[in-house]
Amino acid sequence: MLDIAEELHRWVEQGRDFAVATVVAVGGSAPRLPGAALAVDADGTAIGSVSGGCVEGAVYELCRQVLEDGEAVLERFGYSDEDAFAVGLTCGGVIDILVTPVRTSDPGRKVIADALAAAAVGAAAAVARIVSGPAELLGRALLVRPDGSYEGGSGAHPELDRSIAEEAAAFLDAGRTGTLEMGEQGSRCGAPLTVLVESSVPPPRMIVFGTIDFASALVRIGKFLNYHVTVCDARPVFATAARFPEADEIVVEWPHRYLERTQVDARTVLCVLTHEARFDVPLLQLALKLPVAYVGAMGSRRTHLDRNDRLREVGVTELELSRLRSPIGLDLGARTPEETALAIASEIVADRHGGSGVSLTGAHTPIHHESAQHDTPTALGGRGATTAA
């Protein structure tokens, strides 16, 4: 739902009634991850997507029905080849979809409205909704803030609300969206409930060090991938808004000094395109010690070997060196700055989701991967948690 927060926030401000269908669990080769949503207002206007087209029509009609009935429903869509006109996923996956009404007369509207307002401006917040369990609890929601405070609730048991809030806060801290199971009174025993937690967090950071043409192309593709992109270079003549109009931030400073003082996290990617040892060595010496998602450095294989020797001389360990992606990017045969930027971005995406980088044609590997730190997705009723970054 939070993936279409800006549009839904406008609907709330306009006083519209609507129903929102949210993917809450997937199995097999389903096209969308948990959190993907389709919303339909009282006039029949639709935004978003839950399947890339496979079952949109059926979900649209389900939204219309739920908006009229005022009762949340959980529906499963799977693959069916028995009837050419049957509603199903052509990819062979399974998706569970929760459809909830959000009407001006509903007491839970404020929680959803506040969650949408936070997500629309990029503020950190998580919305947790009960997606399976007793019918009277279906769709009940909590909004959880970064400090652990929350509003809304299940209306069933205070301890359940506290447990959901604690779990949702952990999801929010990691920037994760997914499902968890717990008992009706908040424990790990008793009749199980499934809760979908959707996290809204500020965009991850991409910091590009160096101001060559390749950097300009990488900034553009970084913005396309929804990163908050910073360009840093010690040379003011090159680090200008005119050269990098798409960048969110341009910093004129020695790269390693900027990295020492700026904030990074486990989603941050660092792309070192300075291509000069006086910049590269002190920068990578620090970067390889930080808990970031990706560190890549541009250079030929000869440059790479020489740089590694220099890094060892200043105390960088072999374990730290193993984190360095150098020469940066996947082997796409790239030549131009744009092609090279695509190769770098492809490696970042593959690294994030556990992809191999090989061609899918003729391969016997999954099309959709989950990151190593995530549990394997299951449809509701399976064991474990379902997560998506």
Image (cartoon, helix red, strand yellow):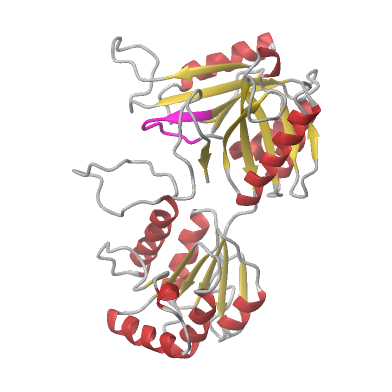
Query: Of 379 and 302, which appears nearest the observer?
Result: 379
Residue 173 position (above or below residue 290): above
State the residue at coordinates (29%, 10%): 82
Name the residue located 61 percent from the left edge and 73 percent from the top edge. Answer: 250
> Is 4 in the magenta?
no
How far across and down, in percent of the image, does residue 55 sit?
A: 44, 21
Q: Residue at x 37, y 27 (%)?
A: 93
Q: Nearer the viewer, residue 362 or 69?
A: 362
Q: Is residue 41 above or below residue 315?
A: above
**On screen, 295 above or below 351?**
below
Q: State the image quarter where residue 334 is shown.
A: bottom left
Residues shaded magenta: 24-33
Q: Residue at x 30, y 54 (%)?
A: 357
- Residue 376 seen in the figure: yes
Left or right, residue 368 beside residue 109: left
Q: Is any part of residue 1 visible from this angle?
A: no
Residue 72: % across, % down: 64, 16
Q: Residue furthest left?
A: 362
Q: Where residue 242 sits in the image (x, y, percent)?
A: 56, 73
Quarter of the image with the N terminus is top right
Q: Main secondary structure of the magenta part?
A: loop
